[in-house]
Image: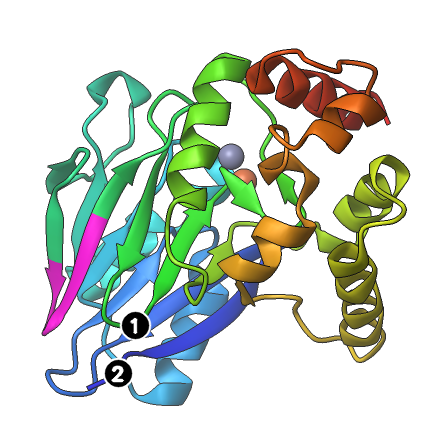
Amino acid sequence: MPADIRIVPCLTDNFGYLVHDPATGATASIDAPEAGPLIAALDKEGWKLTDILVTHHHGDHVGGIAALKAKYQCRVHAPHDANAKIADVDVRLQEGDFVRIGDLTVRVLETPGHTLDHISYVFEDDRALFAADTLFSIGCGRVFEGTYPMMWESLLKLRALPDDFRLYCGHEYTASNVKFALGIEPGNAALQARAKQVETLRAEGKPTIPVTLGEEKQANVFLRADVPSVADAVGLSGSPAADVFGELRERKNNG
Ligand code: ZN
Ligand code: FE
């Protein structure tokens, strides 16, 4: 049975997500930016939270864990990196681990760079990728703890997933990402199409998520650091893709 996925806007621009297995009633929250909106969404659906899948230790992803765990006695799954100091963890996860949410199977991918502990969650049967602050639509997370080559490798790992997978990311940053990407690739038709779509969605007050990975591979400049025309656009023709990626990330930081 396909999973029921709900987008739950939290804090200023975070996306909370609930993934519900209709067959068993199991329900997972991907991260816990804020307990209040997640509890309200669970009440509205008549769902009980059984699991929290944490992606990384930043406060805007773990802030709601304690309150949710106290209310639902749910299991908390988090990255194996014990140094990351995430509280209330029941299960520690690493690359290649599988988590069961009722009848749903979730695969764990280590995607370090934004933080060293960052992991992403893949629901294989539902073709859904929860990439939190590693991969945004038309963007990627800032590289706070890792290196540019490390983050580039993480993006390549996500890029290797099939085109029909849908991306659910950690923040609604798409409009600002589109603006930046158009500055690098003004002639990219897939990006222009996404720009139009994003403008319409935002005008209607709707989230720009999910989006297919196929679309992102065409339109997201941060997934295209190994495309020669992108290297040319940042004055790094012939340079390693990780360097081109680093230059893109620095320009976005300073933009
Ligand atoms: Zn973060
Ligand atoms: Fe975040």
Q: Which amino acid type is shown beneath numbered disc 1?
A: Asp
**CB atoms at circles 2 and 1 under 8 Å apart?**
yes
Front residue of 59/130: it is 130
Q: Is residue 196 above or below residue 240?
A: below
Can residue 103 be found in the magenta stretch? yes
Can residue 76 be found in the magenta stretch? no
C-alpha distance separating marks 2 and 1: 6 Å
Q: Tell me the residue at 79%/66% (across/down).
A: 193
Front residue of 96/64: it is 96
Q: Is residue 5 left or right of residue 114?
A: left
Query: Residue 6: where, in percent of width, then height?
Result: 44, 75
Q: Tell me the residue at 71%/53% (across/down).
A: 174
Q: Is residue 141 above or below residue 64?
A: above
Residue 12 in sight from this viewpoint: no
The residue where tag 2 is placed is: 2
The residue where tag 1 is placed is: 126
Q: Please state the extent of the stretch shown in magenta in the rendering.
A: 100-107
Q: Is residue 15 left or right of residue 86?
A: right
Query: Residue 75: where, in percent of width, then height?
Result: 14, 54
Q: Main secondary structure of the magenta part?
A: strand
Q: Is residue 211 above or below residue 79?
A: below
